[in-house]
C-alpha cells in the first residue's frame, strides 16, 4: 500500500489515499519516487483539456530509485537512480523511423492499462504512463532513464518534463542562435526553463512576458533581460525592445489563444513562433491570408520540446553540472502530496514557478 493522488473523474477534486501496487511484471520497473513536479498538463487532465481514462493516478514529471525490476529489464537495476519518461518512443512507428521520436504514435499507449487498484479494488490507470504522484509506481521499462550523475534526485525530477520541454523548445524547435532576440510568453516552470535555455544559447535581448508582475523577479533570475506585463500593447513593447523589428523568436508557454496570437504579433518579419502551451479546443487563434504572406513568419507546434530524452538528457546534465542551468531556480514551492490541490489553484491564479512534491 502506498499513498497516491487519484483523479476519480474529470472535473472532480483529487483524492489522496492509499493504493495497491503489484510487483513489476515482465518488462516493468518499480520505482520509489523522490520528487515529482506539478505541471500544467496535470491540471489539463483534471479539467478534460487532455483526455485519459479515469480513475487515474496523475503526475508525469518525476525521478526516484529503482526498487525492483521484472523479467527482461536489463538497462536498470535495483538501487539505480532514474528519471521517469512519460513519453517513451517505440522505435518502430513512422515518426520514430524518421527521427521524430517526440511524435511517437505509441508513446501514450500505456495510459489505458490498469496498473494498480485502490483499497476497494477499483482499477486505476497511470495518468500519463508513469503515475508519479505517488510514493511508489510501477512503469514500463522504457519509461525510466538512468538519472544523470551529480544531480540530486529531487531536482532531477524536473528533467522529466519542464526542462526537456523548455530547453528543447529553444534548442530543438526554435533553434535559437547567438545574438537572436527571444520573447518567452508565460513564466511558469516550462517558461523559466525556456528563459534559461535562451541564456545558454547566448540570445539577446531575452524578453519575458507574463500576466503577473510578481513573475518579474523569477524571470530575470532565469535570464530575462527585459520583462513585459501582458496587455494589448505587448507586441508594440517587444518591438521597441528589439530595435523596432520584433523578436527573432517567440516561445509561447501558456496555451491561450491571446498569448499565441501575441507571440506571433511580437515576432519580426521572417521570425519564428514556437507554441509549447497546451490549450483547449475552445481556444481559437485567427490569422488573415494577407498577414501570413506579408510577415512570412513561421508558427510551429512543439511537443515535449521536440526532444529525444536519451539524446538530450546528457546535454542538459552537462549544462546543469557546469552551472549554466539552475534546476532549483525553477522551484518556488516544495510540497507534499496533500499540497497538490493548492498547487493547482496557484497555477490557475498565475502564481509562482514549479511546485515540487518531495517525498
Image (cartoon, rainbow, N blue to C red):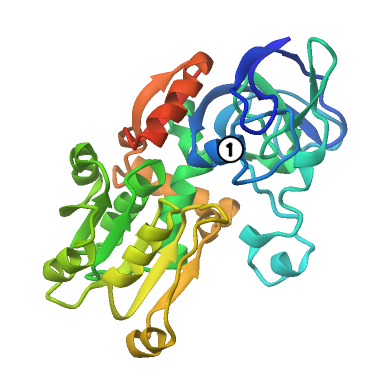
Lateral position of residue 187 relative to residue 72, left or right: left
Q: Residues within 10 Å of mark 1 (few under 14, many from 20)?
A: some
Tally of numbered tags: 1
The residue lying at 71 percent from left, 64 percent from top is 96
Q: Quadrant of the N terminus?
A: top right
Lateral position of residue 120 relative to residue 127, left or right: right
- Residue 229, can we see it? yes
The residue lying at 55 percent from left, 58 percent from top is 303
Work out whether 282 lies above or below 148: below
Q: In front here: 66 or 41?
A: 41
State the residue position of label 1: 47
- Residue 60, can we see it? no
Q: In front here: 151 or 163?
A: 163
Q: In front here: 155 or 2?
A: 2
The residue lying at 34 percent from left, 37 percent from top is 350
Image coords of residue 143 (percent x, y): 69, 41
Image coords of residue 29 (percent x, y): 75, 30
Image coords of residue 18 (percent x, y): 69, 11
Work out whether 33 lies above or below 347: above
Work out whether 80 lies above or below 310: above
At mark 1, the secondary structure is helix
Lateral position of residue 358 relative to residue 272, left or right: right
Q: In front here: 145 or 334?
A: 334
Work out whether 217 lies above or below 279: above
The residue lying at 19 percent from left, 45 percent from top is 220
Image coords of residue 308 (percent x, y): 58, 56
Amino acid at each position: 500500500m502506498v499513498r497516491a493522488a487519484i483523479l476519480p473523474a474529470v472535473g472532480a477534486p483529487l483524492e489522496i489515499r492509499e493504493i495497491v501496487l503489484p510487483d513489476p511484471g515482465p518488462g516493468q520497473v518499480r520505482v520509489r519516487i523522490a520528487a515529482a513536479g506539478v505541471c500544467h498538463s496535470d491540471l489539463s487532465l483534471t479539467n478534460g483539456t487532455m483526455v485519459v481514462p479515469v480513475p487515474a493516478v496523475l503526475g508525469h514529471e518525476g525521478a526516484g530509485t529503482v526498487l525492483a525490476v521484472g523479467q527482461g529489464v536489463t538497462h536498470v537495476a535495483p538501487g539505480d537512480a532514474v528519471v521517469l519518461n512519460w513519453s517513451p518512443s517505440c522505435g518502430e512507428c513512422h515518426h520514430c523511423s524518421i527521427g521524430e521520436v517526440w511524435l511517437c504514435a505509441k508513446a501514450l499507449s500505456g495510459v489505458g492499462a490498469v496498473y494498480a487498484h485502490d483499497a476497494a479494488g477499483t482499477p486505476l490507470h497511470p495518468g500519463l504512463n508513469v503515475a508519479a504522484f505517488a510514493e511508489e509506481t510501477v512503469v514500463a521499462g522504457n519509461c525510466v532513464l538512468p538519472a544523470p550523475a551529480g544531480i540530486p534526485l529531487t531536482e532531477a525530477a524536473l528533467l522529466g518534463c519542464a526542462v526537456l520541454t523548455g530547453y528543447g523548445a529553444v534548442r530543438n524547435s526554435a533553434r535559437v542562435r547567438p545574438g537572436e532576440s527571444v520573447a518567452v510568453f508565460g513564466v511558469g516552470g516550462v517558461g523559466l526553463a525556456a528563459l534559461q535555455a535562451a541564456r545558454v544559447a547566448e540570445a539577446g535581448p531575452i524578453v519575458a512576458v507574463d500576466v503577473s508582475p510578481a513573475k518579474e523577479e523569477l524571470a530575470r533570475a532565469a535570464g530575462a533581460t527585459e520583462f513585459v506585463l501582458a496587455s494589448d500593447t505587448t507586441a508594440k513593447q517587444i518591438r521597441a525592445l528589439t530595435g523596432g523589428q520584433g523578436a527573432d523568436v517567440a516561445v509561447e508557454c501558456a496555451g491561450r489563444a491571446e498569448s499565441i496570437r501575441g507571440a506571433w504579433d511580437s515576432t519580426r518579419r521572417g521570425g519564428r513562433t514556437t507554441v509549447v502551451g497546451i490549450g483547449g479546443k475552445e481556444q481559437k487563434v485567427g490569422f488573415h491570408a494577407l498577414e501570413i504572406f506579408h510577415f512570412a513568419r513561421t508558427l510551429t507546434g512543439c511537443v515535449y520540446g521536440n526532444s529525444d530524452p536519451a539524446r538530450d538528457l546528457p546535454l542538459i546534465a552537462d549544462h546543469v553540472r557546469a552551472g549554466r542551468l539552475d534546476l532549483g531556480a525553477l522551484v518556488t514551492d516544495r510540497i507534499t502530496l496533500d499540497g497538490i490541490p493548492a498547487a493547482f489553484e496557484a497555477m490557475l491564479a498565475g502564481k509562482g514557478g514549479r511546485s515540487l512534491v518531495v517525498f
